[in-house]
Image: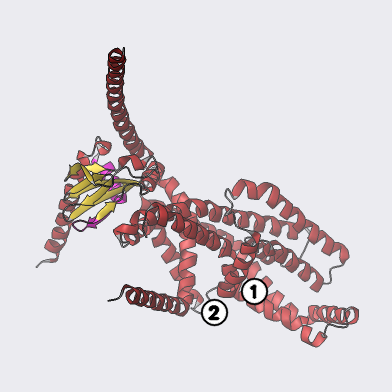
């Protein structure tokens, strides 16, 4: 057969395979989300297992110890945190759709209407938008997968999957690598290793950073007597992982709540100052200490990655956009140098 | 067949397989002195690769990440563009160990001369072993250092002899010129 035709057929087949993979990924989108979260949990917990392994425990023992500890931790925090959290969400939703908050929002709508007449207040519909946004927020924040697969299934599958990914991840990785043809084997091993080095520290650091920021925000809002401080604090911690936009989203949420509950200029200023201080602490102290390595991406790429991530996977996609983009960057650059170094082509 | 005999057969097979790998590993200097438990840990991180006859394992000047240990089969190590045969390796032999410490281009080409089964031990595996089982990792590292030091010592001796020969030759040429 003519080599050009053969090449063309190869390209067509490769394209079809890629299309099929893409279609499959879209179809199993919800299951994939669970798998991504489970892998992420396992990945973040891996150093703790390694630490216990060094101390002489087997991988299975180490995994069981960690999962028992986490279950206990969740049970304890859940006991204190979940009832007020559920109450807060329900109150928040009720508060926005009716009662005083509705009046305040109407006032705000009127105010905007008067001061910026070119904005059509009907299309603005602040109350409707906030209710809708809240609905989405509670859906994406607490039941990321809940809307598609039942929450109970997720709550069972997620720990189950992360347990086995943590226990058998190494063998799984080895088995996957063993499927790679001899020609690309060493190169693939090299790429995986480099990605692990570059992203492992970043992801774990971001996670710890989010926990610290969440804790600080909950306490700051509690001191300032802002309603739903637990809810907003956790939300601020989570969104803090989204670059550029995240910290602003957290602060804005707190300010809107303060506004809805009739907070005056002084209260709003205090909330803004609290968030500014937290951000300052984060940038000057926590980030340099905890997030050891940056992924070294151009801000423009980060912004577009965040937008694209948000389009595909919502909040989770936005949080994972930067590590995913970093991974892609390592993949492409290593593949490029690898192809030359390992003389694959 | 009884269920128990099925299980015992499976385990026997696995046991036999492990024993053959252990025998291969024990012949490799860097794994000498490791206990059965430690060899087990090493075996768990090794990569098993199979090659067809005449398949290239790696080319000269390609980047390398680690060493290969021959479980069964034959490997030719070739040098230069004219593929000069440098060495023929077989069961229990190993090659490419320099790449464990230094990510540098391979100094020769390796080709499978028969159906080949090999165990790959790579830099990331060594690093992860050093992290999870520092004692085992250090033993391997020590043996590796020893092996390389011995080689360096030999090379130094050769170098010295060559230098002596060179000065001899230089003085001979000077005498002849005079």
In the picture, residue B100 is in which quadrant?
top left
In the picture, residue B159 is in which quadrant?
top left
Q: Is residue A75 visible?
A: no
Task: Have a look at marks 2 and 1 and say if they share a chain.
Answer: yes
For this rendering, which residue is in front, B88 or B72? Answer: B88
Residue A69 in the image, given as x and y percentages of width and height: 48, 54
Residue A211 in the image, given as x and y percentages of width and height: 61, 56
Contact flag, marks 2 and 1 (Cβ < 8 Å): no
Q: How far apart are marks 2 and 1 (CA)?
A: 12 Å
Residue lying furthest front: B178
Q: Which quarter shows the C terminus of chain A?
A: bottom left
What colouring does the structure picture have? secondary structure
For this rendering, which residue is in front, B1 or B57? Answer: B57
The numbered mark, 2 or 1, whose residue comes first in the sequence reads 1
What residue is at 30 percent from the left and 61 percent from the top?
A: A181
Taking the magenta stretch, the answer to whether it contains residue B153 is: no
Label ID, residue A193:
none
Which residue has dot 2 on it? A147
Residue A190 lies left or right of residue A107; in this view the side is left
Q: Which region of the structure is painted magenta?
A: B36-55
Residue lying furthest bottom: A122
What residue is at 24 percent from the left and 47 percent from the top?
A: B83
In the picture, residue A312 is in which quadrant?
bottom right
**Vertically, is A117 above or below B54?**
below
Q: Can residue A51 be seen in this view?
A: yes
Residue lying furthest left: B1
Label ID, residue A137:
1
Residue A67 in the image, given as x and y percentages of width and height: 45, 57
Q: Is mark 2 on a helix, strand or loop?
A: loop
**Number of residue marks:** 2
Q: What element carries label 1?
A: helix
Residue A41 lies left or right of residue B9; in this view the side is right
């Amino acid at each position: 057969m003519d080599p050009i035709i053969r090449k063309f057929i190869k390209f067509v087949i490769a394209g079809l395979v890629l299309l099929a993979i893409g279609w499959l990924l879209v179809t199993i989108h919800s299951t994939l989300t669970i798998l991504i979260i489970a892998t992420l949990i396992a990945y973040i917990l891996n150093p703790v297992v390694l630490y216990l392994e060094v101390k002489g425990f087997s991988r299975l023992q180490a995994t069981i110890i960690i999962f028992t500890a986490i279950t206990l931790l969740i049970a304890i925090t859940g006991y204190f945190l979940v009832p007020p959290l559920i109450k807060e969400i329900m109150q928040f939703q009720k508060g926005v759709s009716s009662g005083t908050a509705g009046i305040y929002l109407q006032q705000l709508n009127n105010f905007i209407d008067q001061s910026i007449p070119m904005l059509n207040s009907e299309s603005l519909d602040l109350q409707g938008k906030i209710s809708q946004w809240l609905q989405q927020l509670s859906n994406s924040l607490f039941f990321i997968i809940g809307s598609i697969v039942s929450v109970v299934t997720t709550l069972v599958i997620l720990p189950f999957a992360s347990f086995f990914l943590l226990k058998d991840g190494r063998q799984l990785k080895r088995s996957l690598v063993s499927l790679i043809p001899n020609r690309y084997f060493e190169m693939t091993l090299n790429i995986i290793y480099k990605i692990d080095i570059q992203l492992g520290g970043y992801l774990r650091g971001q996670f710890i950073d989010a926990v610290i920021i969440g804790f600080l925000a909950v306490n700051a809002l509690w001191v300032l007597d802002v309603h739903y401080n637990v809810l907003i604090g956790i939300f601020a911690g989570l969104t803090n992982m989204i670059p550029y936009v995240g910290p602003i989203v957290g602060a804005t949420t707190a300010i809107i709540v303060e506004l809805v509950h009739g907070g005056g200029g002084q209260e709003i200023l205090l909330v803004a100052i609290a968030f500014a201080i937290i951000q300052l602490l984060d940038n000057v102290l926590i980030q340099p200490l905890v997030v050891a390595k940056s992924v070294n991406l151009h801000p423009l790429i980060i912004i577009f990655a965040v937008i694209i991530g948000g389009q595909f996977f919502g909040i989770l996609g936005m949080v994972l956009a930067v590590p995913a983009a970093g991974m892609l960057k390592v993949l492409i650059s290593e593949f490029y140098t690898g192809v030359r170094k390992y003389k694959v082509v | 067949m009884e269920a128990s005999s099925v299980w015992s057969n499976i385990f026997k097979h696995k046991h036999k397989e492990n024993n053959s790998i252990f025998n291969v590993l024990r012949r490799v200097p860097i794994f000498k002195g490791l206990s059965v438990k430690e060899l087990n840990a090493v075996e768990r991180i090794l990569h098993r690769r199979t090659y067809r006859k005449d398949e290239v394992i790696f080319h000269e000047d390609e980047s390398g990440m680690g060493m290969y240990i021959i479980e069964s089969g034959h490997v030719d190590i070739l040098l230069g563009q004219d593929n000069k045969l440098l060495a023929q390796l077989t069961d229990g032999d190993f090659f490419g160990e320099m790449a464990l410490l230094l990510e540098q281009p391979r100094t020769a080409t390796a080709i499978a001369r028969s159906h080949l089964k090999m165990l790959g031990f790579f830099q990331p595996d060594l690093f992860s072993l050093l992290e999870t089982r520092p004692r085992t990792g250090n033993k391997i590292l020590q043996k590796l250092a020893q092996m390389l030091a011995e080689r360096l010592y030999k090379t130094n001796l050769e170098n010295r002899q060559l230098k002596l020969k060179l000065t001899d030759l230089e003085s001979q040429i000077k005498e002849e010129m005079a």
